[in-house]
Structures are given as C-alpha cells and as structure tokens.
Image (cartoon, grey):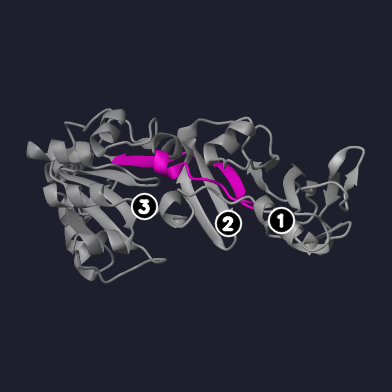
Amino acid sequence: MLRIFLALFVSASLSACMFTPREGPLSTEIEKQSTQNDYLVVDVDSTIVDGLSRFNPVGLHTQFTTTSQRLPVSTVGTGDVLSVTVFEADQGGLFSGAGGNKAEFPHVVVDNKGEISLPYSGTIKVKGKTPLQIQNLVVESLEGKAIQPQAMVNVVRNENNVVTMSGDVTKPGLYPLSNKGIRLLDVVAQAGGTKFPARETYIILMRGSRQGVQLLETVMDQPDENIYVSRGDRIYLSHDPQRYTVLGAVQKPSVYTFNSSTVSVLEAIAAAGGLNDNRADATGVFVFRYEEPKVLDTMNIHYTRQVRGKVPTIYRINMKHAQSYFYAQSFHLQDKDSVFVSNARSVEIGKLLQLMNMATSSVRNIAVTGKNLEIYD
C-alpha cells in the first residue's frame, strides 16, 4: 500500500511541474500563438522604427486644413448690434442738419430674420455679411435718394461671433472673436488656462459636424496645431493623463503616467527599475498595442484581424543585440500601451527542478516515516 501511495504522489508532483505559475507567456509561446491570426507579431528594426516615426496622427491642422492657417472672416449674425454712419457729399441732402451732412445710428440691432432697418434705406438683409459688405448694401439702398452717399459700419456688440469654452478650464463660457482673428491658445488663455498639466490635457475642437482632438502640450509645441478658431466653434478641454503599463520580468511592474509628451520603451523599462537579471528573457521585450491599420499599411505589413477597426499588434525587441537599445530609445509609446518582458526559459526549468526536488524530498521523508512505522510494528 505504501509503495502505491508513493507512486501516486510522485506522479502528481511531476504533473504539477507542467503547470508552474508565472506572470505571462514565454517569448516562444507568443510567437507560436500568433500563427492562429489572433494578433500580429512584428520584429522591431530600423525600418519599423523609421516607419513609426514618420507616421503622424491626424491633428487639428490636418482636420481643419481649409481654415487652419487662414484668418477667419468676421460676419454679422442675429442679435449683433451695429453702428451705422451715413455721409452725403453736399448740403441739402436727406441727412443734412446741424451736425453736418451725416446721420449716425449707433445701436442698430440685427433682428431674428437677420435684417436691419434704416431711414430711407428700408430693410436690409445683413446676416452672414461682413461690415464692408453691409456698407455697400447701405450705399446701394440710398442711391438716387441721397447725394453721393457713403457709409461706415462697425460691430458694437457681437452676440454671434463667439466660441464656447468648456471642460477643465478655469473660466468656461462664451468668448468673442476679434476681427483680426484669434488662435486656439489665445482662447484657452482668455478662459484662464487649464486646471491640469498640458501633457495630461486633451483639447477637443468641434466645428459643425467635424471634430479634432489633440494633446494640449502638442498644440503648444507645434505652431501648426495652434489654428485659428471660427465663429460657433466649441472647444472642450479634457483631463485624461496618458498611461502605459509595464509587466513581467522587471523590478517594479506597474501602471505609469507619461511624465513628458513622449516616453520611449527604454525609458519605460528604466522607470520600472530595469530588467530582472534573474528572470528576464532579453530577447523577449514586447509592446502590446491596438495599431491603426494605416500605420501598418505604410510599412507594408500584412494583417488579417481587426478589433474595433484596429489591429492587435505586438512589437518585439531583442535586447540582446546592441543596436536594439537604439530601437528601444526611438520607439515611442502611445497611451494605453503595455510593455511586457517575458521570463527566460531557464527560469521555468529552474521552477521545474525545484518542484521535482520538493517532490523527491517528500518521497524520502514518507519512505523514512514508513520504515519507522514498520519498525514499530
């Protein structure tokens, strides 16, 4: 009976060795499982690094390319208050009086039909017109009535030419636009700026049916992204810190926040305390990412599977090669990326030998106990 028990114990112990606990898959397992087309494994080299660095996400400048670098045209809308002054060339005209050959109308309100009404001119449609265009309309309405009329139109109070600021700003609200044009960062400054660091804040611009998103720090660093705003724009600032995860055979696995606008794989590993010398497989440093298909297309990488429009992609860096440190330094992480360092196969073998040693030690102990029992019998 004792021999049967010992045999069963040894068999169970050896079976358990096949399921030793570990934090994640081995490097070979990641590559083997990719053949099932669940994800794509890409070995990082100079071509991949260059391809990724050339790809720039669609920013505000590209999204609003037709208006981003052009001064917006200030037009009149419903509720605006205009100042209209009409001049005549000689005495005896419609507007002659003690004040000279002119008439001033300092508070002309644009009604809900987008129209204004002036003496002798009648009703004039002004909605969507610039002050200069309105001047010409006033002059045309007085032709044949006044003596060589001229007009001057100014916007006294602009109720329509505004943008909306909301979200994580100090003073959300409506902000008027000047005739000389105003850029995105100017409006943010008028609203008191963001409540959080620029590298943790996204700026969302909505213009009609179009929407663009950009990191506020990028808008500050890249002048092209600091576009002109237009009437009716809705600007929303959102505090959303960028994060990445480092797991596996590193000293301090954890979730980390970007401490600058860019973080490389090398910097991420250093932030996690570096590779664990006793466990890490230097050939198996991986970056897990849902990649944009157009990024892979530009590098001529074939893929078959997509999840919510993106491709599950694992970038592999072999840190045993010296040049790979340059690749890791140039490979910039994105928000929600995961860096995983796999265990070396020798670690798994060591676990197996340790379990086998525990099993044989237990067998010896049981054998000794059995002999002692036989002696007592």
Quadrant of the rendering where the N terminus is positioned? bottom left
Question: Is 302 placed above or below 90 here?
Answer: below
Q: What residue sits right under mark 1 in the picture?
A: 134
Q: Quick check: 353 left or right of 81?
A: left
Q: Is residue 353 visible from the viewing direction of this image?
A: no
198 on left or right of 285: right
Q: Is residue 129 magenta?
A: no
- Pointer 1 local density, CA inside 10 Å: few below 14, some 14–19, many at least 20: many
- Using a 10 Å C-alpha cutoff, classify the residue at mark 3 as few (fewer than 14 neighbours), some (14 to 19) or many (20 or more): few
Classify mark 2: residues with Cα within 10 Å, few (<14), some (14-19) or many (20+). some
Query: Any mark on residue 174, and which?
Result: none
Instruction: Please state the horizontal and vertical placement of residue 356, each as a whole percent of the image.
Output: 15, 44
- Residue 72 place in picture, x, y as percent: 56, 50
Residue 125 at least partly seen? yes
Residue shown at 45% from the left, 48% from the top: 69
Q: Which residue is mark 3?
A: 57
Q: What's drawn in magenta, residue-wise? A: 223-247
Q: Which residue is mark 2?
A: 207
Front residue (pair 297, 31): 297
What amino acid is at disc 1? Ile
Amino acid under label 2? Arg
Q: Residue 174: x, y in percent?
A: 71, 43
Name the residue at 27% across, 37% down.
Answer: 264
Relative to 134, does residue 228 appear above or below in the rendering?
Answer: above
Disc 1 + disc 2, Cβ < 8 Å: no
* Outermost bottom residue: 304
Specify the amino acid type for callout 3.
Pro
